[in-house]
Amino acid sequence: MKLLLATRNAGKLREFHQLLAEFPVELVTLDAVPGAVEVEETGDTFESNARLKATGYARQAGCWTIAEDSGLVVDALGGAPGVHSARYSGVHGDDDANNRKLIQELQGVSGRSARYVAAIVLARADGTVVAVAQGVCEGSIVDEPRGKGGFGYDPHFVAIGETRTNAELDPREKHAISHRGQGLRTFLPLLRAQLGLQSESG
């Protein structure tokens, strides 16, 4: 059974492959969908964008599809960068530029509470949404980037209970606390149920 991962973000693809490694399906990417047309992320919430992508790409690919939308929410910035996290600097996917803008916007600000949020959506081949899950990782922002792992804002994000940034954690440690890891732990039983697969204990 094929399951499309509807993202071109290399970091997200890497994490999804790691988190779904033991799942009994064939994971495919958008590169396997000839002529796939980019789905516009016009929603004002992470869930609405994930729904748009799941529905749009499922119909194009004609197979079950997982789509995810996620980002960083900073309280002192009124929730920014939020759904614009990937293009906060004006250039989509430029992590360095996005991080520079984030730290510039926080200059002189003492309150650094923030959270990563992920919404994960499953759609059938006809585009019908059949499962939705969300994960949240609370933390704070530090000025100096630390670590070489992860992607996005990870070098500046320290989760509650941690002294290291997400970029300093190894993949297993990050998955245990990350928004995407938490969201997938809620999502996987829903996915198994929809695909008619036995649970690991079954």
Image (cartoon, helix red, strand yellow):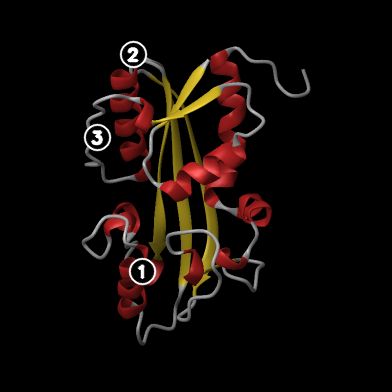
Which residue is located at x 24 percent, y 26 percent?
Answer: 35
As drawn, the label of residue 39 is 3
Nearest the camera: 56 or 42? 56
For marks 1 and 3 on the same chain, the one whose residue lies earlier in the sequence: 3
Q: Characterize the local packing of mark 1: few (<14), some (14-19) or many (20 or more) Cα atoms within 10 angstroms.
A: few
Name the residue furthest bottom.
108
Image check: 157 left or right of 177? left
Which residue is located at x 36 percent, y 63 percent?
Answer: 95
As drawn, the label of residue 96 is 1
The number of discs equals: 3
| Residue 159 sits in quarter | bottom right
Gap between marks 1 and 3 measured at Cα? 24 Å
For marks 1 and 2 on the same chain, the one whose residue lies earlier in the sequence: 1
Gap between marks 3 and 2 measured at Cα? 16 Å
Point out the frontmost of discs 1 and 2.
Answer: 1
Which residue is located at x 48 percent, y 76 percent?
Answer: 145
Image check: 18 left or right of 41? right
Gap between marks 1 and 2 measured at Cα? 38 Å
Q: Characterize the local packing of mark 2: few (<14), some (14-19) or many (20 or more) Cα atoms within 10 angstroms.
A: some
Which residue is located at x 59 percent, y 45 percent?
Answer: 182
Nearest the camera: 19 or 104? 19
Nearest the camera: 116 or 24? 24
In the displayed structure, 33 sits above or below 118; it is above
Q: Secondary structure at mark 2?
A: loop
Name the residue that disc number 2 marks: 126
